[in-house]
Amino acid sequence: MNYTRVKIKSMKTASMGTLSFFEGGTDKLGFEIKRFYYIYGVSKDTKRGGHAHKRLRQLLFCPYGIIKIILDDGKEKRIEILDNPSEGLLLEAGIWRDMYWEVDDAVLCVAASEFYDENDYIRNYEEFLKWKGEDR
Ligand code: T46
């Protein structure tokens, strides 16, 4: 499946916690960041997602809490757990995703390759499979 689990650089600052960072640029993420968004205030057992993107590429990470992500490219499914602020998922286009909040108030942060465009979403699973079947 067309995604990778990536490390986010982190620096422990003794008793003052940890600082994590990544830098934009096509050489690092494979795309320029055009948008950044984050999802918070979500209760345990909430399910979000239920869609795929035609073009959008994204880096997802969870700086606080635990979020289970189920990825599906129409052929296979993978389960990924985001529970470490120093790791992320770099998702290419064409992957269906469902996100499950495993604890209250987990935060999902996303760096995205494109501005928001509802036309880039496929929100119907049958439509997704049909789109994947069209030589993708
Ligand atoms: C994704 C996962 C990981 C905007 O107006 N601008 C934005 O930048 C975004 C991301 C969303 N919206 C609107 C669209 C909907 O009316 O916010 C509403 C909630 O979005 P949605 O139901 O798509 O949220 P999630 O959590 O299911 O999915 C989001 C992203 O939309 C999606 O691209 O990959 O997070």
Image (cartoon, rainbow, N blue to C red):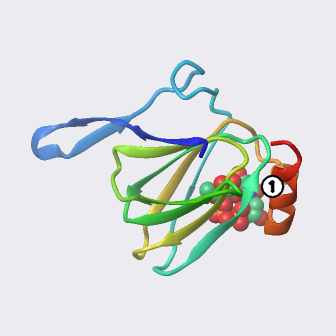
Q: Which x, y percent locates residue 7?
A: 37, 37
For ligand 1, give the image quadrant. Answer: bottom right
Residue 70 lies left or right of residue 17; in this view the side is: right
Q: Residues within 10 Å of mark 1 (few under 14, many from 20)?
A: some
Q: Residue at left 33%, top 53%? A: 84
Q: Residue at left 68%, top 52%? A: 95
Q: Quadrant location of residue 59? A: top right
| Kind of residue indicated by mark 1 | Tyr
Q: Which x, y percent locates residue 26?
A: 60, 21
Q: Secondary structure at mark 1?
A: strand
Number of marks in the rendered image: 1
Residue 127 lies left or right of residue 75; in this view the side is: right
Quarter occupied by the C terminus: top right
User: Which residue is at the front of the view, 116 or 5?
Assistant: 5
Above or below residue 77? Residue 54 is: above
Above or below residue 79? Residue 63 is: above
Q: Residue at left 42%, top 74%? A: 102
Q: Which residue is mark 1?
A: 121
Q: Residue at left 43%, top 71%? A: 105
Residue 57 lies left or right of residue 133; in this view the side is: left
User: Which residue is at the front of the view, 107 or 97?
Assistant: 97
Q: Which x, y percent locates residue 119?
A: 88, 51
Seen from this angle, which residue lies furthest top?
27
Q: Quadrant location of residue 121? A: bottom right
CB at mark 1 closer than 8 A to ligand 1?
yes
Q: Quadrant location of residue 24? A: top right
Above or below residue 120? Residue 6 is: above
Q: Which x, y percent locates residue 10?
A: 28, 36
